[in-house]
Amino acid sequence: MNRKTLIIILVITLLLLLAGGTYWYYTNKLVGTTPVSEFPGESGALVGGGGPVPTETSPEDDSVFAPGSGATLPRLYELHKAPVAGVGFAETKDKKGFIANITARYIERGLGHIYETQLSTYSKSRIVNETRSRIGEALWGNNGKSVVVRFVDDKEGGTINTRVVNISVPTISFARGTSTEAISTSFLKTEEIFLPDFIPFMAISEDGADKLFYLEGGSGSTATYKDTSVSKIFNSAFTEWLPQFPNQKLVTLTTRPSATVPGHMFFLNTDTKAVTKILGGINGLTTLTSRDGKIVLYSEIKEGFPELSAYDVAKNEFRSLYLQTLPEKCVWSSKKTTLVYCAVPQALPNAIYPDQWYQGLVSFSDELWEIDTRTFVTRKIMTPRTLDAPVLDIIDLAVSSDDSYLIFINKVSSNPWVYSIIEPAPITVATPSAETTTPSVEDTASFIAPDMQKLR
């Protein structure tokens, strides 16, 4: 055997040993790792090229939050690591009317993937096998079965597009296995309804009714989640209105706020189309009306900072709540009409309010407070740092129909969180109920952002 042949044999042997060692390492050391997708916002494992597996649980989640483990869920929990455009509740009741299951649903900003988290175990799954890119804002309603998505279409010169995505029954998804075509999981089907372009502001009915309200210029219209026909109920020469839809008979309209500009607020009766002035001449005015329309939570800029107050519409009484925050950081209780939950900054940096907070030039470190607007008793219920959480600038709050959970978004990161108002009990083995029915429409609190900073 000559020297050249010997060198070739040695090289081939070394390559085989290297290949074998590499194979052993990846099959023994990296078992269970999840491939990282090249797409931003993608967090699912890849299976046979068939896309993300809907159910996502890490080994840590299985050991800590598994049913029957006896572990106690953290009271404050980050639902998703990627930015989301909106978060809402989906609730299921049994035949006796008791809540059987509560989930949080949310849609990612980057690719528009829709997920839900079971709040009894914090198990997460992707429920819709579709992609909608660059969602800027999402409003959840219809007990989590509908979401209004809004995005800017750069190809059309920055047009704001609005779609209603109705989520319905499961559809079968197939993924290629090692030998045969096998069913991997069930996804939910969707139906997409187009709303007019250039809608600057809109709101959904907060009493569970199947209604939307949106503005086009100075004109205001109502529609439903599945019906494209509209009913025009409002017209004004002024176009800078921020709407809220406390119940299906009442829309509130507040002028867009600025620190030195007097603001005004009106009630719009959706049946009679009558417009009634409620508040006026208040600098930096922003508002949040209770679902029964009897109390208006509002902020006024005093000495450069927002001061929270309550206005009793029937009694024509004003009362300061002695808290410095904005109504956009609050949500009304589902069970008690006079109770409101608010995120209150621990300290307010010097800034022009509310303008520079909307613009993202300043941010807050919030605590959660409970306020009774009838007795004016206030109580701090949560400080993030005591629960090992980062600084949270809380927006887009929603409360479950039994007042057991608050969900919200951290304005700084756009990540969704949940806070259990009631101390969580240890996890037990879930027993399926034969009486469980399909979700019914319940109160969900949804709030439109005061500007379109989300739609970027």
Image (tube, helix red, strand yellow):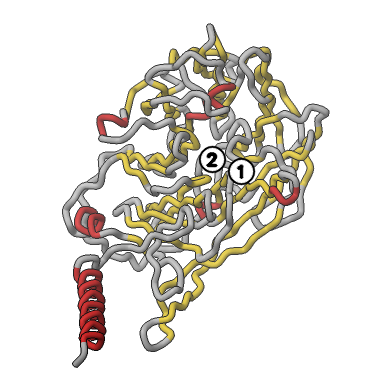
In the rendered image, the residue lying farthest to the bottom is 1
- The image position of residue 235, as x and y in percent, is 81, 34
Q: Secondary structure at mark 1?
A: strand
In the rendered image, the residue lying farthest to the right is 237
Residue type at the position of mark 1 = Ile
- The image position of residue 298, as x and y in percent, is 55, 21
**The image quarter in which residue 11 lies:** bottom left
Q: Residue at x 40, y 39 (%)?
A: 406
Residue type at the position of mark 2 = Ser
Query: In the displayed structure, does residue 403 sit left or right of residue 237?
Result: left
Q: Are marks 1 and 2 in contact (CB under 8 Å)?
A: yes
- The image position of residue 417, as x and y in percent, is 39, 42
Q: Which residue is mark 2?
A: 446
Query: How many residues crowd mark 1 within 10 Å: few (<14), some (14–19), many (20+)?
Result: many
Q: Residue at x 42, y 41 (%)?
A: 407
In the rendered image, the residue lying farthest to the top is 303
Q: Nearer the viewer, residue 118 or 361?
A: 361
Q: Nearer the viewer, residue 21 or 84?
A: 21
Query: In the displayed structure, does residue 38 sit left or right of residue 100?
Result: right
Q: Residue at x 58, y 44 (%)?
A: 137
Q: Secondary structure at mark 2?
A: loop
Query: How many residues crowd mark 2 within 10 Å: few (<14), some (14–19), many (20+)?
Result: many
Q: Is residue 95 visible?
A: no
Q: Residue at x 28, y 30 (%)?
A: 385
Q: Nearer the viewer, residue 379 or 149?
A: 149
- The image position of residue 103, as x and y in percent, is 40, 53
Q: Is residue 45 visible?
A: yes
Choose the circle earlier in sequence order: 1 or 2. Answer: 1
Q: Is residue 317 above or below residue 423?
A: above
Q: Which residue is mark 1?
A: 204
In the rendered image, the residue lying farthest to the left is 70
